[in-house]
Image (cartoon, rainbow, N blue to C red):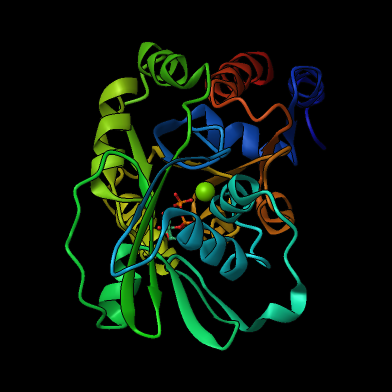
Amino acid sequence: SIPLGYFGGIGGAAKRGIFVKGSTFLDALNTVKTVVFDKTGTLTKGVFKVVQIVPINGFSKSGLLQLAAKVELHSNHPIAQSIRDAYGENIEVSQVRDYEEIAGYGIRAKVENRIVLAGSDRLLHKEKIAHDICQIEGTVVHLAVDHIYAGYIVIADELKEDAKQAIQALKQMGVEKTVMLTGDNQAIASRIAQQIGIDSYQAELLPEEKVSAIEKILSTASKHSKVAFIGDGINDAPVIARADIGMAMGGLGSDAAIETADIVIMTDAPSKVAEAIQIARKTHKIVW
Ligand code: ADP
Ligand code: MG
């Protein structure tokens, strides 16, 4: 039978917006020594704003934005939402054909009979589209039209209010390692890591590379210490499944992420990870 103390632990966690799907996860949390975070939507708000539009090869700013908004018409990614918001006009669905979302890279679609690409540096690289590598402090969406580089749009996201505190609290509790994994570029990852004091980060990861990254972290962790991962995203569910303790953001999170997670943080606050560990430790003292 399940010791009564667990019910107290699970109930207490629920009252604080932490939904624990079973007592085994409380036990596992008790020995967490490594906490791995996704970036977008987990440490940052996941609400982007367009801050700069840089057209080249004859495009105008408004022309480039319009093209970007159209190619992003069907994407659920927060990047796509920010570009559609900045454009602000209605888009005829019939203008966008052959839509294809390439996870971790971006979008390809036919817009008014031109092949348009929108996405990361890596997407253009993969498609062999020549462009200057730009070192920009921000998330960048590159655009290409009929295989010719058309410029880029810089978008910015904000840290969540408690992102720094979330890392500090874990360190104070004796968590040995904090890590950030992101598909976003090196420049932005390095700045955020510095701002919040996270121990290490890996950037420009494709969804499957996030899975290998967590596997590597799991294999180097000592036998008796557990690894927790917390994410929100469309692409995070496989990483959540792989970690010893998979955690998802309940509000921002995709359905797949929430379903796969062992623990769901209803308030989307990263500092709840430390709170969950604290509850697990208290529960452990009561049960044993
Ligand atoms: P994160 O790990 O930060 O949650 P993703 O894996 O979702 O990021 O995406 C990684 C990168 O792929 C983004 O930073 C962006 O450059 C590109 N990308 C993904 N989806 C889109 C999209 N809909 N439009 C443009 N670029 C995209
Ligand atoms: Mg994400």
User: Who is closer to the viewer here, 162 or 264?
Assistant: 162
The image shows residue 284 at horizontal and vertical percentages of 61, 21
User: Who is closer to the viewer here, 138 or 159?
Assistant: 138
The residue positioned 51% from the left and 17% from the top of the image is 162
Is residue 235 toward the left or the right of residue 8 in the image? left
Is residue 55 toward the left or the right of residue 1 in the image? left
Is residue 214 toward the left or the right of residue 237 in the image? left
The residue positioned 30% from the left and 68% from the top of the image is 122
Is the residue 211 above or below the residue 232 in the image? below
Question: How many numbered badges does the structure rendering display?
Answer: 0
The image shows residue 231 at horizontal and vertical percentages of 54, 44
Quarter holding the C terminus is top right
The image shows residue 183 at horizontal and vertical percentages of 39, 55
The image shows residue 247 at horizontal and vertical percentages of 60, 42
Quarter holding the N terminus is top right
Is the residue 169 above or below the residue 276 in the image? above
The residue positioned 51% from the left and 85% from the top of the image is 114
Query: In terms of image quadrants, where is residue 227?
Result: top left
Query: In terms of image quadrants, where is residue 197?
Result: top left
User: Who is closer to the viewer here, 32 or 210?
Assistant: 210
Is residue 86 toward the left or the right of residue 58 in the image? right
Is the residue 142 above or below the residue 45 in the image? below
Is the residue 255 above or below the residue 227 in the image? below
The residue positioned 58% from the left and 38% from the top of the image is 47
